[in-house]
Amino acid sequence: MQYLMITNNPKIGKYIIQNGVDRVFIDLEKLGKDIRQSHLDSWKSNHSFEDILSMRNVINGKRILVRLNPWNNNSLNEINIAIEYGADFLMLPMIIEFEEIYKFCKAVNSRVPVIPLIETKESIGLLERIIGLEGVNEIYIGLNDLSISHGYKFMFEPLRNGMLDKAAKILNNSKMVWGFGGIARTGCGNLPAEYLLGEHVRLNSQRVILSRSFHENSNNLDYLISNLNFKNEIEKLSQKYNYWCMASQDEIQKNQKNVHERIKNIIKNF
């Protein structure tokens, strides 16, 4: 499992890379997001292209993932600036038509890997075509907007209703590396990490974003360090992930039923 965390603070970026995070996630998506998620207490970005440069100065290796805006008239310019400033991976969100991700990959032209963000009902239906595009070696499934696009009450509903299982079958059959959703600390959140990680193992998901609740929405390093033992919390996730990797099929299936029941109960309370 590789862990991603959204931050534009170079001090935090350097610290988390040293303590178990695999990629720093800089989020430049702004177009349409406030309207789509205005009713949710979800992440709204204030990141800028200059943050890529600042992060590049303190992080070595292929560690910086940049999410750009949905495909638009300025996308080529956004792509070129992000690559010039040091992005190692580029993510395209809110794919509605195949032509959008096709043009995006063409514009990137294999300069860096492209990670399509599957978060609309249209894009999940295009999955088999998207995974065949040149430059796409990894997929991420975003549950917030995917659930919004289907009218679901809870972001993890696609985990309960079989939608992620169908996507996983397509991705795993093509040997595509992929991940989904966000994750809190062990013992925390509506759907605790220790159970959710069992579903990641069952589905063969190998990427996950650390949620805001994981790091207490930290925006400076002193606050982050004072609020949690970050390295220890990452190690707890890794230990639980390794536990599920070694678990029997019976244990995996029992956990699946447990997760489904928890999601069902959460939805009841909406």
Image (spheres, rainbow, N blue to C red):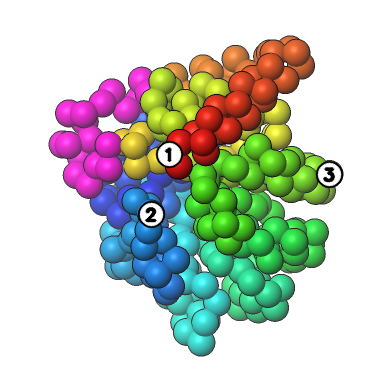
In-front residue for pair 126/225: 126
Span highlighted in magenta in the image: 216-233
Quarter-of-image position of residue 236: top left
Q: Residue at x 58, y 33 (%)?
A: 264
Q: Residue at x 40, y 40 (%)?
A: 211
Quarter the C terminus occupies: top left
Vertical relation: 24 (above or below) 203: below
Image spot of residue 206 (x, y percent): 62, 37
Vertical relation: 229 (above or below) 180: above
As for residue 99 lying within the magenta part, the answer is: no
Q: Residue at x 56, y 41 (%)?
A: 156
- For label 3, the SS is helix
Residue at label 1?
Answer: 210
- For label 1, the SS is strand
Q: Earlier in the sequence, mark 2 or mark 3?
A: 2
Whole-angstrom CA distance, mark 1 to mark 2, is: 18 Å
Q: Amino acid at mark 2?
A: Leu
State yes or no: discs 1 and 3 in contact (Cβ < 8 Å): no
Whole-angstrom CA distance, mark 1 to mark 3, is: 27 Å
Image spot of residue 51 (x, y percent): 30, 62
In-front residue for pair 131/18: 131
Badge 1 crowding class, 10 Å Cα cut-off, few under 14, some 14 to 19, many 20 or more, is: some
Q: Amino acid at mark 3?
A: Asn
Residue at label 3?
Answer: 173
Lateral position of residue 241 relative to residue 138, left or right: left
Q: Which mark is residue 40?
A: 2
Image spot of residue 77 (x, y percent): 47, 82
- For label 2, the SS is loop
State yes or no: discs 2 and 3 in contact (Cβ < 8 Å): no
Q: Residue at x 47, y 26 (%)?
A: 192
In-front residue for pair 223/56: 223
Quarter-of-image position of residue 220: top left
